[in-house]
Image: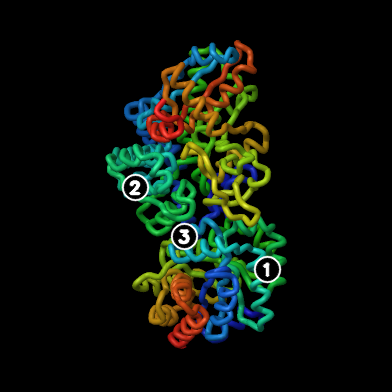
Amino acid sequence: MNRIENAFKNKPIFMPYFPLGYPDLDTSIDVIEALAQNGADLIEVGLSFSDPLADGPVIQKATQVALEKGITIKKSLAAVAELRKRGVTIPFILMGYFNPMLAYGLEKFVHDAREAGADGFIIPDLPLEEAGEFQTLVGDLPLIQMLAPTSPNARMESIARHAKGFIYLVSVTGVTGARTTISDGLGDLINRVREHAKQSVPVCVGFGIGTPEQARQVGVLADGVIVGSACVKTIGESQDPIEAARKFAKNFRDALR
Amino acid sequence: MKTTLFPTKFGTYGGQFVPETLMPALIELERAFVGAQKDPDFRREYEGLLASFVGRPTPLTYAKRLSEKLGGAQIYLKREDLAHTGAHKINNALGQALLVKRMGKKRVVAETGAGQHGVASATAAALLGLDCVVYMGVVDIARQEPNVFRMKLLGAEVRPVISGTQTLKDAINEAIRDWVTNVSDTHYLLGSALGPHPYPTIVREFQSVIGIEAREQMLRDVGRLPDAVIACVGGGSNAIGVFSGFVDDELVELIGVEAGGSGIASGKHAVRFGDATKARVGVIHGTRTYVLQDEDGQIAETHSISAGLDYAAVGPEHAMLRDNERAFYTSATDEEALSAFQTLCHIEGIIPALESSHAVAEVIKRAPTMRKDQVILVNLSGRGDKDLNTVIKELGTL
């Protein structure tokens, strides 16, 4: 059983996002370690890009800080390797935009990511239509497929056929960022995905989930809950980011139990 | 998975590198476009507006004194500066706004650099009764103030963009973020031959009227095709529009002029095709093309005196035309463009946009090397009233 399948043994799972290099590289490594040790089941490890068009203001700002402090793909992969050296065993999914990976060299990127201990990839600007070359390169490492409220049923079916690891369901149309309420139609949307994505892979929901209570509501419906902007904001604004990460993970973990 | 009606790529360039949320909207847009192209009523309405509202066909002007001064090729200007709103951008804005009506959407968002596309979008939206929001970097708002006021007068909301480099690239990011949020009732009225398929094709088709008219006018008024067609290239919509009329005429040389800024060596420019150290094939704003970037794949800051050319990527069809050597790309610096701007003002009585002045700068370099019986067609993509503040700042009080 690989690390991702293993992570889904106890559902719903808690999947925070945090970008490497924010507020600085060393702190981000400690933060991710703290998230892992305090209840995260899988971590989306953010790779920064100058033009993150699927992200809202919180993640834009954090990744811009990371870039200003000198984060690169190379340093990010070294940080993943460092986390493995520290004994963190939960799956890491690298989340980033396509251009920095292209610039690094796709084949080298996939190779080095695997060596560093990454378990898969999320690339928001690489829809199925453009994913062919990358899909071939990654082999058994999943390129996580995304579905959106706008995806028609037939499209859900064909995307789900390619799904490995889990399906990332975008809960609302829009960019990343916490919303005040969970959309009323989420239950119907998840049902529609389960009906048309006739696959055994788990369905995780992201975009707009900001509080443990919202995570609890979504966790009733989905196999996993992805929390990005709220995690970045809470930890980034704290005087003690590591302690904030511990608390953040515990709170969400408790809400999902 | 084949979901599109026609190829999404130009050779290896182009494509649809967008979040899943937007894919259905791109598929819907392509269907609407293909349907509209086949619908005589749509064509009649579009062409009718081009004539009665935009003032097409725009004239072809013989630049007699400029030709004499340079002493070489005869120079003809395709006068897109005389189109309503003062630039070629209206051709595409109106076409897309009609598609929006066809798709039953009520709201458009647009990006703008120089403000010309923003003004064109606001105008088309006013004409057709659509809500319009224009995203514009605060750096560009400062240097194109008259256009900001025009957009507001036309009923559009101008939203200043303070993220990133605060120029065109960031305005596109914000427009896409708005679009992805409001995609059910909103169309992204993209202004250049850029972005994900089908935009580069749609924009080329709506701008091809420039090339179709220019070719007819050359044959009718001059009795021959030009030896060279010259246009400035930011994203590349005016260039692809005029090139498309001549691309099958193999003897006609096609020349695109990028923004050389302070010179390629200075690093402050927007020359995607001429800077081997910073420009590589990459993916930005949904398309695979030549992109100015650093070695880690972060999009580079660009510089040009003209906001409309100040962008890190070039339209994917231009990338193909460059690779297969059907078109040739060069650049003009800020200084060369300013000098060309003044020359055209003084000896032809035409105030060109700073963008178009880059094309004129190439004419000034090239015409003297050509024979007097040769002909250059230059696409004068816009007028320069919007640039007076910039020019006054650069040249002082004259």
Image quarter of the N terminus of chain B? bottom right
Judging by the rendered image, the residue that carries numbered circle 1 is A113
Q: Which chain contains the residue that carries disc 1?
A: A
Task: Give the residue drawn at x 58%, y 46%.
Answer: B14
Front of the two marks 2 and 3: 2
- On the same chain: label 3 and label 1? no
Front of the two marks 3 and 1: 1
Q: Residues within 10 Å of mark 3 (few under 14, many from 20)?
A: many
Q: Which chain contains the residue that carries disc 3?
A: B
The secondary element bearing badge 2 is classed as strand
Judging by the rendered image, the residue that carries numbered circle 2 is B158
Residue B190 position, x and y percent, is 44, 44
Judging by the rendered image, the residue that carries numbered circle 3 is B21
Q: How many marks?
A: 3
CA gap between label 2 and label 1 equals: 42 Å
Rendered position, B57 above or below A26? above
Q: Is residue A157 visible?
A: no
Residue A165 position, x and y percent, is 60, 74
Camera-nearest residue between A42 and A160: A42
Amino acid type at mark 1: Ala
CA gap between label 3 and label 1 equals: 27 Å
Rendered position, B294 above or below B305? below
Residue B149 position, x and y percent, is 31, 40
The secondary element bearing badge 3 is classed as helix
Q: Which chain contains the residue that carries disc 2?
A: B
Camera-nearest residue between A179 and A71: A71
Circles 3 and 1, Cβ within 8 Å, touching? The answer is no
Task: Give the residue drawn at x 50%, y 26%.
Answer: B379
Task: Give the residue drawn at x 58%, y 56%.
Answer: A129
